[in-house]
Structures are given as C-alpha cells and as structure tokens.
Image (spheres, rainbow, N blue to C red):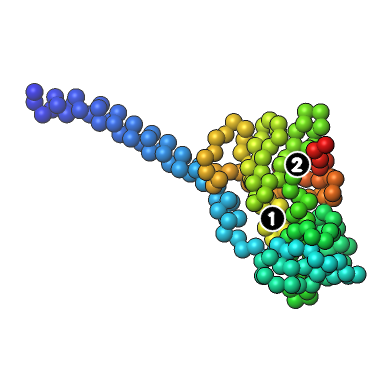
Amino acid sequence: MCCRQLYVLLLPLTAILLAVTSCTSCSDSRRKAGTVNPMVRELDETPDEAEFVRLDRIGADSIHVFSRTKKRNESFAYKEAEANQHIYGTLRVGDIYSVFPETKRQSVSIVINVTQLKGRWIYDSVEFRGIDFNDKGGMSSINTGDICFREWKLLNGRLYIYYVDAQTVADDRHKYEVEEAHILVFDEKRLVLLFKGETYDCSKYIKE
C-alpha cells in the first residue's frame, strides 16, 4: 500500500480520535468545575469576629458572660441590640450564645441563642415536615421532599444553611449549596426563617 493510500485511511481515524479526546476533555472540565462550591470555601476561610459565650448573669443593661472563644469573663451592653430587635432567642442564664461585639464600646449588636436554636423545628405539622439543628453544626431534614439540609453555621452574626437538592448525591461538603437564612422571629417556641425566597414558620418540637 502506498503512502498516499495509507494517509487517506488514517485521516478519518485521526479526526475521530481528536473529536473523542476533545469531548472527554470538555466533560472532565465541566465535572471538575462543578465539584467545589467556591462559597463554601469562602465561608470556611472567613474569620468569625463573633464570640461563643455562656450567659452567667443578666444586669439592668448588660449581660455578663464567660467567653468560650477568649476563655475569660466579659460584660457587654445589650440594650442597643434589643432596641434593634437583634436579640434572637431569649436571654436565659446558662445558655450558649453567639454574640457579635462592638469592642470599642463594649456592647453587642447581635445576640443569637445557640442553645434554643438546636433541636427540631416543625413547619408543617400535618405532614410532619421540619428542620433539625444538630450539635456541632450538623443539620438534617424531616420529610422536606425537594431539599436536604446538611449543615448550619453562625458566622459574624449571620446564619448560613448548607443544603443539596433531594435528587443530588454529594459525597463532599464542598459540593453543597449554601445561602444565608434570615431570622425573622425567634423565641422559645417559634422560629421563622426566610430561606431561598421561602418562609419557614416553625414551631419547636417537644417530645411528649
């Protein structure tokens, strides 16, 4: 077989191989781009200026706490946070809080009761649908259907919820979706969250 005939035979095969290689490369590129959600990494790397504290005493205008973050006793004025409705949950001695301090004025602008947040919150009592805030940032769904909650995080006075679509299998937390959940109402019995454009009006589930 002459060289010209061999070239004619090999040319289509080469074109096919190049096409397959190109498609494989594109497919791999898309798969790699979708493996990590950059916002998850960004939140992981964002310093948290809030402190986790235990409330030891409530004064007329100040809360006296033990800071688990700084390992020391501290006092913060809280009236401004109260006036701005930025105290989420109730003030209760012994509970753990995330407080966002205004260090120059020794006051707090945001107070979130972590102890009260933990546990089951039901927003559909008929179908028993709800959200479970577990210890150490774990989170789980209760019959939620189209969304699976995975983690929660308090960062700089904001609540972030990590989740996946019910049809999605994510074997790495960096593949989760994450968005801020806005706390509209929060007390011992009720938690109202605005999340992904939906309002979750929840009642605390207390096992009888």
Element under label 1?
A: strand
Instruction: Answer with left or right where residue 67 lies relative to residue 176.
Output: right
* Mark sitting earlier along the chain (1/2): 2
Q: Which residue is mark 1?
A: 154
Question: Residue at the spot x=67%, y=70% of the render?
Answer: 71
Instruction: Answer with left or right where residue 167 lies relative to residue 90.
Output: left
Q: Is 42 situated above or below 141?
A: below
* Image position, residue 22 (x, y; %): 36, 36
From this viewpoint, is residue 197 visible?
A: no
Question: Residue at the spot x=46%, y=39% of the render?
Answer: 31
Front-most of 34 and 69? 69
Question: Residue at the spot x=58%, y=43% of the render?
Answer: 176
Q: Which residue is mark 2?
A: 120
The type of residue carrying mark 1 is Leu
Outermost residue toward the bottom in this view = 104
Front-most of 13 and 24? 24
Instruction: Answer with left or right where residue 80 lies relative to residue 28.
Output: right
Front-most of 8 and 123? 123
Question: Residue at the spot x=85%, y=50% of the render?
Answer: 187
* Image position, residue 10 (x, y; %): 20, 28
